[in-house]
Amino acid sequence: MKLVVENTCPTQWRFEYESNDPELENLYELAKTNQWNVTTDINWDQEIKNDSDILARKENPLGRSKFFARLSKETQQEVMANQAAFTLSQFLHGEQGALLCCGELVDAVPDIEGKLYAATQVMDEARHVEVFHKYLKKLDKHYPITDGLKNVLDAILAAETWQQKCVGMQIMVESLAMGSFKNMLVTADDQLLKDIVTLTARDEARHVSFGIISLQHEIPSMPEEERAALEDFALAALNILVGRRGDARLPGRSFGFEQPLIDAGLDPKEVQAALTEEFKTAPPPKTEQQPLFQAYMLPNLERVGLISDRMRPQYIEAGFINPQQAA
Ligand SMILES: [Fe+2]
Ligand SMILES: [Fe+2]
Protein backbone atom coordinates (compact mmCIF):
# COMPACT_ATOMS: atom_id res chain seq x y z
CA MET A 1 0.00 0.00 0.00
CA LYS A 2 1.46 3.35 -1.08
CA LEU A 3 1.87 5.68 1.90
CA VAL A 4 3.03 8.78 0.02
CA VAL A 5 0.81 10.92 -2.22
CA GLU A 6 2.46 13.65 -4.29
CA ASN A 7 0.53 16.90 -3.89
CA THR A 8 1.08 19.74 -6.34
CA CYS A 9 -1.73 22.00 -5.14
CA PRO A 10 -0.19 25.42 -4.34
CA THR A 11 -0.07 26.79 -0.80
CA GLN A 12 -1.45 30.32 -0.53
CA TRP A 13 -0.62 33.07 1.93
CA ARG A 14 -3.25 35.72 2.61
CA PHE A 15 -2.51 39.04 4.31
CA GLU A 16 -6.05 40.40 4.32
CA TYR A 17 -7.01 39.26 7.81
CA GLU A 18 -10.43 40.89 7.80
CA SER A 19 -13.16 38.39 6.91
CA ASN A 20 -15.56 39.21 4.08
CA ASP A 21 -17.75 36.20 4.53
CA PRO A 22 -20.26 36.35 7.41
CA GLU A 23 -21.54 32.83 6.64
CA LEU A 24 -18.09 31.28 7.08
CA GLU A 25 -17.47 33.43 10.14
CA ASN A 26 -20.64 32.03 11.72
CA LEU A 27 -19.62 28.50 10.84
CA TYR A 28 -16.21 29.11 12.43
CA GLU A 29 -17.88 30.35 15.63
CA LEU A 30 -20.14 27.29 15.66
CA ALA A 31 -17.15 25.00 15.15
CA LYS A 32 -15.32 26.58 18.08
CA THR A 33 -18.26 26.22 20.46
CA ASN A 34 -19.17 22.66 19.35
CA GLN A 35 -15.78 21.06 20.03
CA TRP A 36 -15.99 17.86 22.10
CA ASN A 37 -13.55 15.50 23.74
CA VAL A 38 -13.45 11.79 22.89
CA THR A 39 -12.04 10.99 26.33
CA THR A 40 -14.61 12.81 28.44
CA ASP A 41 -17.75 13.33 26.34
CA ILE A 42 -18.35 9.65 25.53
CA ASN A 43 -19.26 7.10 28.18
CA TRP A 44 -16.71 4.40 27.38
CA ASP A 45 -17.95 2.23 30.25
CA GLN A 46 -20.88 1.16 28.06
CA GLU A 47 -20.45 -2.45 27.01
CA ILE A 48 -21.04 -3.56 23.43
CA LYS A 49 -23.70 -6.20 24.08
CA ASN A 50 -23.63 -8.11 20.83
CA ASP A 51 -21.01 -7.35 18.22
CA SER A 52 -22.90 -9.35 15.58
CA ASP A 53 -25.85 -6.96 15.67
CA ILE A 54 -24.12 -3.60 15.78
CA LEU A 55 -25.18 -2.85 12.22
CA ALA A 56 -28.69 -4.05 11.37
CA ARG A 57 -28.90 -7.32 9.41
CA LYS A 58 -31.87 -6.13 7.41
CA GLU A 59 -29.73 -3.30 6.01
CA ASN A 60 -27.41 -5.86 4.46
CA PRO A 61 -28.47 -7.79 1.32
CA LEU A 62 -26.53 -10.81 2.56
CA GLY A 63 -28.17 -10.60 5.99
CA ARG A 64 -31.61 -10.54 4.33
CA SER A 65 -30.94 -13.52 2.05
CA LYS A 66 -32.20 -17.10 2.29
CA PHE A 67 -28.58 -18.21 1.86
CA PHE A 68 -27.73 -16.41 5.10
CA ALA A 69 -30.69 -17.95 6.91
CA ARG A 70 -29.31 -21.42 6.09
CA LEU A 71 -25.93 -20.74 7.74
CA SER A 72 -25.30 -21.92 11.30
CA LYS A 73 -26.06 -19.40 14.02
CA GLU A 74 -22.37 -19.15 14.90
CA THR A 75 -21.36 -18.43 11.30
CA GLN A 76 -24.14 -15.86 10.94
CA GLN A 77 -22.89 -14.08 14.04
CA GLU A 78 -19.31 -14.18 12.91
CA VAL A 79 -20.11 -12.83 9.44
CA MET A 80 -22.13 -9.95 10.86
CA ALA A 81 -19.53 -9.11 13.50
CA ASN A 82 -16.80 -9.14 10.85
CA GLN A 83 -18.83 -6.98 8.48
CA ALA A 84 -19.50 -4.42 11.22
CA ALA A 85 -15.76 -4.25 12.00
CA PHE A 86 -15.01 -4.01 8.30
CA THR A 87 -17.46 -1.14 7.72
CA LEU A 88 -16.33 0.80 10.77
CA SER A 89 -12.68 0.25 9.77
CA GLN A 90 -13.45 1.94 6.45
CA PHE A 91 -14.92 4.87 8.40
CA LEU A 92 -11.70 5.08 10.42
CA HIS A 93 -9.55 5.14 7.27
CA GLY A 94 -11.94 7.61 5.62
CA GLU A 95 -11.59 9.89 8.65
CA GLN A 96 -7.81 9.83 8.26
CA GLY A 97 -8.27 10.73 4.58
CA ALA A 98 -10.47 13.66 5.65
CA LEU A 99 -7.85 14.75 8.21
CA LEU A 100 -5.09 14.79 5.57
CA CYS A 101 -7.26 16.51 2.97
CA CYS A 102 -8.43 19.18 5.34
CA GLY A 103 -4.85 19.93 6.35
CA GLU A 104 -4.23 20.56 2.67
CA LEU A 105 -7.25 22.87 2.51
CA VAL A 106 -5.77 25.08 5.25
CA ASP A 107 -2.82 25.65 2.88
CA ALA A 108 -4.73 25.83 -0.34
CA VAL A 109 -7.93 27.85 0.15
CA PRO A 110 -7.34 31.49 -0.76
CA ASP A 111 -9.25 33.43 1.92
CA ILE A 112 -8.38 33.84 5.58
CA GLU A 113 -11.87 32.87 6.81
CA GLY A 114 -11.63 29.61 4.85
CA LYS A 115 -8.21 28.86 6.36
CA LEU A 116 -9.45 29.50 9.90
CA TYR A 117 -12.55 27.39 9.38
CA ALA A 118 -10.55 24.54 7.78
CA ALA A 119 -8.26 24.56 10.83
CA THR A 120 -11.26 23.70 13.05
CA GLN A 121 -12.11 20.87 10.70
CA VAL A 122 -8.59 19.47 11.03
CA MET A 123 -9.25 19.12 14.78
CA ASP A 124 -12.69 17.62 14.10
CA GLU A 125 -11.22 14.96 11.82
CA ALA A 126 -8.42 14.19 14.30
CA ARG A 127 -11.14 13.57 16.88
CA HIS A 128 -13.02 11.31 14.45
CA VAL A 129 -9.89 9.23 13.80
CA GLU A 130 -9.43 8.95 17.57
CA VAL A 131 -13.03 7.98 18.29
CA PHE A 132 -13.38 5.29 15.60
CA HIS A 133 -9.98 3.85 16.50
CA LYS A 134 -11.03 3.64 20.15
CA TYR A 135 -14.33 1.95 19.26
CA LEU A 136 -12.63 -0.59 16.99
CA LYS A 137 -10.15 -1.36 19.77
CA LYS A 138 -13.13 -2.19 21.95
CA LEU A 139 -14.45 -4.49 19.20
CA ASP A 140 -10.94 -5.97 19.04
CA LYS A 141 -11.15 -6.38 15.30
CA HIS A 142 -10.17 -4.17 12.40
CA TYR A 143 -9.60 -4.36 8.65
CA PRO A 144 -7.30 -2.58 6.19
CA ILE A 145 -8.56 0.10 3.83
CA THR A 146 -10.14 -1.19 0.60
CA ASP A 147 -8.43 -0.39 -2.71
CA GLY A 148 -11.55 1.49 -3.87
CA LEU A 149 -11.62 3.85 -0.88
CA LYS A 150 -7.84 4.36 -1.00
CA ASN A 151 -8.04 5.26 -4.71
CA VAL A 152 -10.76 7.84 -4.16
CA LEU A 153 -8.96 9.43 -1.22
CA ASP A 154 -5.64 9.44 -3.08
CA ALA A 155 -7.28 11.13 -6.08
CA ILE A 156 -8.63 13.87 -3.80
CA LEU A 157 -5.31 14.29 -1.97
CA ALA A 158 -3.43 14.50 -5.27
CA ALA A 159 -5.92 16.91 -6.91
CA GLU A 160 -4.21 19.99 -8.32
CA THR A 161 -6.66 22.65 -7.17
CA TRP A 162 -8.35 23.47 -3.88
CA GLN A 163 -11.68 23.55 -5.70
CA GLN A 164 -11.28 19.88 -6.71
CA LYS A 165 -10.29 18.88 -3.18
CA CYS A 166 -13.26 20.80 -1.83
CA VAL A 167 -15.71 19.13 -4.23
CA GLY A 168 -14.24 15.66 -3.67
CA MET A 169 -13.98 15.77 0.10
CA GLN A 170 -16.35 18.43 1.43
CA ILE A 171 -19.23 17.83 -0.95
CA MET A 172 -18.94 14.23 -2.13
CA VAL A 173 -17.23 12.14 0.57
CA GLU A 174 -18.68 14.21 3.44
CA SER A 175 -22.22 14.00 2.02
CA LEU A 176 -21.96 10.22 1.75
CA ALA A 177 -20.59 10.03 5.29
CA MET A 178 -23.48 12.19 6.54
CA GLY A 179 -25.97 9.85 4.88
CA SER A 180 -24.29 6.75 6.34
CA PHE A 181 -24.21 8.27 9.82
CA LYS A 182 -27.89 9.23 9.65
CA ASN A 183 -28.72 5.66 8.62
CA MET A 184 -26.61 4.24 11.42
CA LEU A 185 -28.35 6.42 13.97
CA VAL A 186 -31.65 4.80 13.02
CA THR A 187 -30.54 1.22 12.42
CA ALA A 188 -27.47 0.55 14.61
CA ASP A 189 -28.09 -1.54 17.71
CA ASP A 190 -25.40 -0.28 20.03
CA GLN A 191 -25.75 2.75 22.27
CA LEU A 192 -22.02 3.48 22.39
CA LEU A 193 -21.83 3.61 18.59
CA LYS A 194 -24.94 5.79 18.47
CA ASP A 195 -23.38 8.23 20.96
CA ILE A 196 -20.24 8.40 18.81
CA VAL A 197 -22.16 8.86 15.58
CA THR A 198 -24.42 11.57 17.06
CA LEU A 199 -21.44 13.77 17.92
CA THR A 200 -19.50 12.92 14.74
CA ALA A 201 -22.46 13.64 12.44
CA ARG A 202 -22.87 17.07 14.04
CA ASP A 203 -19.32 17.90 12.97
CA GLU A 204 -19.78 16.41 9.49
CA ALA A 205 -22.83 18.62 8.88
CA ARG A 206 -20.58 21.67 9.35
CA HIS A 207 -18.00 20.21 6.98
CA VAL A 208 -20.58 19.86 4.22
CA SER A 209 -21.72 23.45 4.88
CA PHE A 210 -18.12 24.63 4.51
CA GLY A 211 -17.94 22.98 1.09
CA ILE A 212 -21.25 24.42 -0.05
CA ILE A 213 -20.54 27.97 1.13
CA SER A 214 -17.02 28.03 -0.36
CA LEU A 215 -18.03 26.60 -3.72
CA GLN A 216 -21.23 28.60 -4.07
CA HIS A 217 -19.06 31.71 -3.89
CA GLU A 218 -16.30 30.35 -6.08
CA ILE A 219 -17.89 28.45 -8.96
CA PRO A 220 -19.87 31.30 -10.61
CA SER A 221 -16.69 33.36 -10.91
CA MET A 222 -14.47 30.59 -12.30
CA PRO A 223 -13.23 30.83 -15.91
CA GLU A 224 -15.32 28.61 -18.19
CA GLU A 225 -12.54 26.10 -18.82
CA GLU A 226 -11.72 25.61 -15.13
CA ARG A 227 -15.37 25.28 -14.26
CA ALA A 228 -15.83 22.59 -16.91
CA ALA A 229 -12.78 20.72 -15.54
CA LEU A 230 -14.31 20.86 -12.06
CA GLU A 231 -17.62 19.51 -13.35
CA ASP A 232 -15.78 16.63 -15.04
CA PHE A 233 -13.81 15.94 -11.86
CA ALA A 234 -17.06 15.61 -9.87
CA LEU A 235 -18.56 13.08 -12.29
CA ALA A 236 -15.31 11.08 -12.44
CA ALA A 237 -15.17 11.00 -8.64
CA LEU A 238 -18.80 9.89 -8.50
CA ASN A 239 -18.01 7.02 -10.87
CA ILE A 240 -15.21 5.84 -8.59
CA LEU A 241 -17.19 6.39 -5.40
CA VAL A 242 -20.43 4.62 -6.19
CA GLY A 243 -19.86 2.85 -9.51
CA ARG A 244 -22.43 2.96 -12.24
CA ARG A 245 -25.91 2.23 -10.99
CA GLY A 246 -26.01 -0.97 -13.05
CA ASP A 247 -22.96 -2.29 -11.21
CA ALA A 248 -24.32 -1.24 -7.85
CA ARG A 249 -27.26 -3.60 -8.32
CA LEU A 250 -25.01 -6.64 -8.55
CA PRO A 251 -25.21 -8.55 -5.30
CA GLY A 252 -21.45 -9.04 -5.21
CA ARG A 253 -20.98 -5.31 -5.29
CA SER A 254 -23.71 -4.35 -2.88
CA PHE A 255 -22.49 -6.48 0.01
CA GLY A 256 -19.00 -6.60 -1.36
CA PHE A 257 -16.91 -7.47 1.65
CA GLU A 258 -14.72 -10.47 0.90
CA GLN A 259 -12.34 -10.64 3.84
CA PRO A 260 -15.07 -10.65 6.50
CA LEU A 261 -16.58 -13.69 4.75
CA ILE A 262 -13.24 -15.49 4.50
CA ASP A 263 -12.61 -14.80 8.18
CA ALA A 264 -15.93 -16.46 8.99
CA GLY A 265 -14.89 -19.57 7.07
CA LEU A 266 -16.92 -18.86 3.91
CA ASP A 267 -15.80 -18.78 0.29
CA PRO A 268 -16.75 -15.36 -1.16
CA LYS A 269 -17.14 -16.82 -4.66
CA GLU A 270 -19.60 -19.43 -3.38
CA VAL A 271 -21.50 -16.76 -1.46
CA GLN A 272 -21.71 -14.54 -4.51
CA ALA A 273 -22.82 -17.41 -6.76
CA ALA A 274 -25.52 -18.42 -4.28
CA LEU A 275 -26.82 -14.85 -3.95
CA THR A 276 -26.73 -14.20 -7.69
CA GLU A 277 -28.84 -17.33 -8.19
CA GLU A 278 -31.22 -16.38 -5.39
CA PHE A 279 -31.70 -12.81 -6.59
CA LYS A 280 -32.34 -13.99 -10.15
CA THR A 281 -35.59 -15.62 -9.10
CA ALA A 282 -36.41 -13.34 -6.17
CA PRO A 283 -34.72 -9.94 -6.35
CA PRO A 284 -33.64 -8.61 -2.96
CA PRO A 285 -36.42 -6.58 -1.37
CA LYS A 286 -36.09 -2.95 -2.39
CA THR A 287 -35.49 -0.57 0.45
CA GLU A 288 -37.80 2.43 0.37
CA GLN A 289 -34.82 4.69 0.67
CA GLN A 290 -33.02 6.26 -2.25
CA PRO A 291 -29.33 5.32 -2.51
CA LEU A 292 -27.28 7.55 -0.23
CA PHE A 293 -25.53 9.36 -3.06
CA GLN A 294 -28.87 10.36 -4.59
CA ALA A 295 -30.37 11.45 -1.29
CA TYR A 296 -27.36 13.34 0.07
CA MET A 297 -24.69 13.98 -2.53
CA LEU A 298 -26.46 14.92 -5.77
CA PRO A 299 -28.56 17.70 -4.19
CA ASN A 300 -25.34 19.28 -2.93
CA LEU A 301 -23.60 18.98 -6.29
CA GLU A 302 -26.70 20.59 -7.78
CA ARG A 303 -26.69 23.34 -5.14
CA VAL A 304 -23.15 24.44 -5.97
CA GLY A 305 -23.90 24.38 -9.70
CA LEU A 306 -21.83 21.40 -10.80
CA ILE A 307 -24.64 19.54 -12.57
CA SER A 308 -24.80 21.99 -15.46
CA ASP A 309 -26.79 21.60 -18.70
CA ARG A 310 -23.65 20.16 -20.26
CA MET A 311 -23.28 17.56 -17.50
CA ARG A 312 -26.90 16.53 -16.86
CA PRO A 313 -27.17 14.18 -19.88
CA GLN A 314 -23.97 12.45 -18.72
CA TYR A 315 -25.44 11.88 -15.24
CA ILE A 316 -28.58 10.47 -16.84
CA GLU A 317 -26.58 8.27 -19.19
CA ALA A 318 -24.57 6.88 -16.27
CA GLY A 319 -27.82 6.12 -14.41
CA PHE A 320 -27.08 8.58 -11.59
CA ILE A 321 -30.06 10.80 -12.36
CA ASN A 322 -33.45 9.45 -13.23
CA PRO A 323 -34.57 11.07 -16.56
CA GLN A 324 -38.04 11.75 -15.10
CA GLN A 325 -36.49 13.83 -12.33
CA ALA A 326 -34.12 15.58 -14.69
CA ALA A 327 -36.50 18.06 -16.27
FE1 LIG B 1 -14.97 13.23 9.91
FE1 LIG C 1 -15.64 15.55 7.92
Image (cartoon, rainbow, N blue to C red):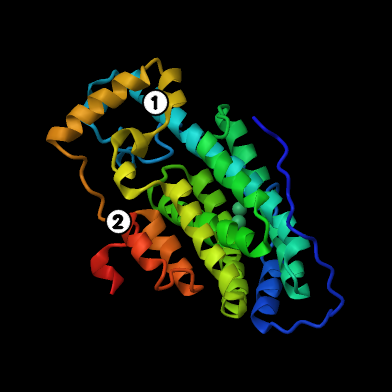
Q: Give the residue number, with chain letter if any, for mark 2.
A: 289
Residue furthest to the right in view is: 15
Q: Position of residue 27 (x, y in %)?
A: 65, 73
Of residues 313 and 204, the one nearer the viewer is 313
On screen, residue 242 versus residue 136, left or right, reads: left
* Visible residue check, residue 213: yes
Tell me which residue sits at (26%, 24%) in the image. 273
Q: Earlier in the sequence, mark 2 or mark 1?
A: 1
Residue 23 horizontal/vertical position (percent): 64, 80
Q: Residue at x 39, y 30 (%)?
A: 80
Local SS, label 1: helix
Rendering coords of residue 120 (x, y %): 72, 63
The answer to whether residue 212 is visible is no
Answer left or right for 295 relative to 219: left
- Residue at disc 2, secondary structure: loop
Q: What is the crowding at mark 2: few (fewer than 14 residues within 10 Å), some, or many (at least 20)?
A: few
Q: Which residue is mark 1?
A: 79
Amino acid type, label 1: Val
Q: Residue at x 27, y 62 (%)?
A: 322
In which quadrant will I find the C terminus? bottom left
* Residue 135 quadrant: top right
